[in-house]
Image: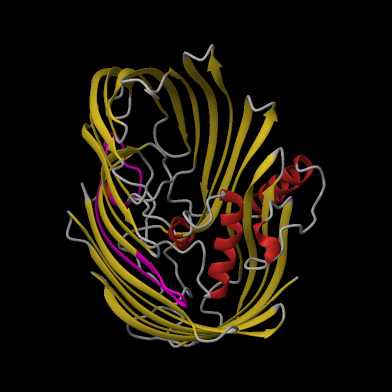
């Protein structure tokens, strides 16, 4: 854990140097007249203190005991918008102390960061990103509905650095050459860490003003697993892009891929694919792609419709995930992702929008990194099939989000015993639905409420179900100081038993 903290601080220091050392707040507060100007750097340190009292701090079905947790949490939010660096960082480090001893004291990191560095004259770039959050180790293990005494959670971090060059060859073709290094680490010893390296290249044209475009691309990927086999995967494709109309593009492709993911020796597979991208208006888009791959038929479909204050989305996919510490199902996004999409039309600049999203979530006391679908960790390549329907409604003083998700996950590498849920389950089905609501009562006071219902079931007969509801109230106590009160109620049950929990928490946050 200290190594992750040092890594994050090192990345932040690097970005500050690349930004030219100008750590001044030049953008103004969100909603102020200065907020519309192009900011150099916007930075906001904060510190909060909180207390949570749970009625079942040891998550027991027969001998529940209360638990009181105290925490101190310094944090940093920054948005960079310079000639060389564009990105954002949202980080906090929480020191948690449990008075009744039902849980172990710990330091807890949270990170959501992404930036692009211009290294050379709009030709060479470096993408940097990182995330740290808690993940469920098993889909069927106990889950605390209040975040206390959760023996089934593990702090999991992902950092990615990707330098690349891109440009145009005489105006007749565009090129990109990219290298990516990604590390994934989790605190638990019963799931695999990994290092992934990918080298990719693409050359092609788009039918801008023409009816026909083309592309060729290739990539080579190596995954080094702390547990289990290391794997390598190579793929090369060539394709055509047909512009049926200014609003509709059709793509066809063919290629070959070679890997050792489902076999001990490297095998080659032919690939063929077809897809279309239709954008009948600025408010509506639809894309569908289908491709024959080594695991069978893969697909990705997305439909989105926007109005002035709403977003309606449907997505479906079937794909392989090569990251060994990935979530067991395809992530459907965080609260940050939903609000970012909600504000994308009104604030097209991605950096100013990042600042607005962070402020928006703070106003409604909504955690930015909270997943709308509780994932679980696996230790090998998996095949993920998901469907999701989501709706976001943004009123003058209220915001409502609704998510319904179904997913099926299975292991592609079945050649070893790796100690995860797939040792005893050939597949795991999950379904979840949730709704959240935030409302500004006054200029300084807001309330929020949320409900989540999630079920997991495995082919072995293992199952779990989690239901939780929360109500919160936040208000501004001083110009840069706020206070929140949160009530939580929940129920969890699996094949080993069930338990209920209720908690009340309070927090005071000061932003500098």
Write the start and end of the magenta stretch as one range.
392-421
Indicate the quadrant where residue 414 lies.
Answer: top left
Q: Nearer the viewer, residue 274 or 48?
A: 274
Instruction: Establish if 452 lies above or below 486.
Output: above
Q: Is residue 405 left or right of residue 98?
A: left
Expressed as whole percent of the image width and height from the top left, the position of residue 402 reads: 32, 67
* Residue occupying image coordinates x 80% and y 56%: 24
Residue 279 lies, in percent from the top left, at: 31, 41
Check the picture and name the quadrant holding the C terminus: bottom right
Pinpoint residue 88: horizontal percent, then vertical percent. 62, 51
- Position of 283 with respect to 183 (left or right) is left
* Residue 41 seen: yes
- Residue 8 among those drawn in magenta: no
State which quarter of the image contains the N terminus: bottom right
Is 371 placed left or right of 498 in the picture?
Answer: right
Residue 99 visible in the snapshot:
no
The front one of 205 and 119 is 205
- What is the x, y in percent for residue 71? 63, 76
- The residue depicted at 47 percent of the width and 78 percent of the height is 397
Q: Is residue 420 magenta?
A: yes
Q: Is residue 20 left or right of residue 353?
A: right
Furthest residue toward right = 21
Q: Is residue 258 above or below residue 340?
A: above
Picture layout, residue 273 above or below residue 30: above
Task: Give the colour scheme of this rendering.
Answer: secondary structure
What residue appears at the point 47 percent right and 13 percent down from the top-left corner?
Answer: 172
Q: How many marks?
A: 0
């Amino acid at each position: 854990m200290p190594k992750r903290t040092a890594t994050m601080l090192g990345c932040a220091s690097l970005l500050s140097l690349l930004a030219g050392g100008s750590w001044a707040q030049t953008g103004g507060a969100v909603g102020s007249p200065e907020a519309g100007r192009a900011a150099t750097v916007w930075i906001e340190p904060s510190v909060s203190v909180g207390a949570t009292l749970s009625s079942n701090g040891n998550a027991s079905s027969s001998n529940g005991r209360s638990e009181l947790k105290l925490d101190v949490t310094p944090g940093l939010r920054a948005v960079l918008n310079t000639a060389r660096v564009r990105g954002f960082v949202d980080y906090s480090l929480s020191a948690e102390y449990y008075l009744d001893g039902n849980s172990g004291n710990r330091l807890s990191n949270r990170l959501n960061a992404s930036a692009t560095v211009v290294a050379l004259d709009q030709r060479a770039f470096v993408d940097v990103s990182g995330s740290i959050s808690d993940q469920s180790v098993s889909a069927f293990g106990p889950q605390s509905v209040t975040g206390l005494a959760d023996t089934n959670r593990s702090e999991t971090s992902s950092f990615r650095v990707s330098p690349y060059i891109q440009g145009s060859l005489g105006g007749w073709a565009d090129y990109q050459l990219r290298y990516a290094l990604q590390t994934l680490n989790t605190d638990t010893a019963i799931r695999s860490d990994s290092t992934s390296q990918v080298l990719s290249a693409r050359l092609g044209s788009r039918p801008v003003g023409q009816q026909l475009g083309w592309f060729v691309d290739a990539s080579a990927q190596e995954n080094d697993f702390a547990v289990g086999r290391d794997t390598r995967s190579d793929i090369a494709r060539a394709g055509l892009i047909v512009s049926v109309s200014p609003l509709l593009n059709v793509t066809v492709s063919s290629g070959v891929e070679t890997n050792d993911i489902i076999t001990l020796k490297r095998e080659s597979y032919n690939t063929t694919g077809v897809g279309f991208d239709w954008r009948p208006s600025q408010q509506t888009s639809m894309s569908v792609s289908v491709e024959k791959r080594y695991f069978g038929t893969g697909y990705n479909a997305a439909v989105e419709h926007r109005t002035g204050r709403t977003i309606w989305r449907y997505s479906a996919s079937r794909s392989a995930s090569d990251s060994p510490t990935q979530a067991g199902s395809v992530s459907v996004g965080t609260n940050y992702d939903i609000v970012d999409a909600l504000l994308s039309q009104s604030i097209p600049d991605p950096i100013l929008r990042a600042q607005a999203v962070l402020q928006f979530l703070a106003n409604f006391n909504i955690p930015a990194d909270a997943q709308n679908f509780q994932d679980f960790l696996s230790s090998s390549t998996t095949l993920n099939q998901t469907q999701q329907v989501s709706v976001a409604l943004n009123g003058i003083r209220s915001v409502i989000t609704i998510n319904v998700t179904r997913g099926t996950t299975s292991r592609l590498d079945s050649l070893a015993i790796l100690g995860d849920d797939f040792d005893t389950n050939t597949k795991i089905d999950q379904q979840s639905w949730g709704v959240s609501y935030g409302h500004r009562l006054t200029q300084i006071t807001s309330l929020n409420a949320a409900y989540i219902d999630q079920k997991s079931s495995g082919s072995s007969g293992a199952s779990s179900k989690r239901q939780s509801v929360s109500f919160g109230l936040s208000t501004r106590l001083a110009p840069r100081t706020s206070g929140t009160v949160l009530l939580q109620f929940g129920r969890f049950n699996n094949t080993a038993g069930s338990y209920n929990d209720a908690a009340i928490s309070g927090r005071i946050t000061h932003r500098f």
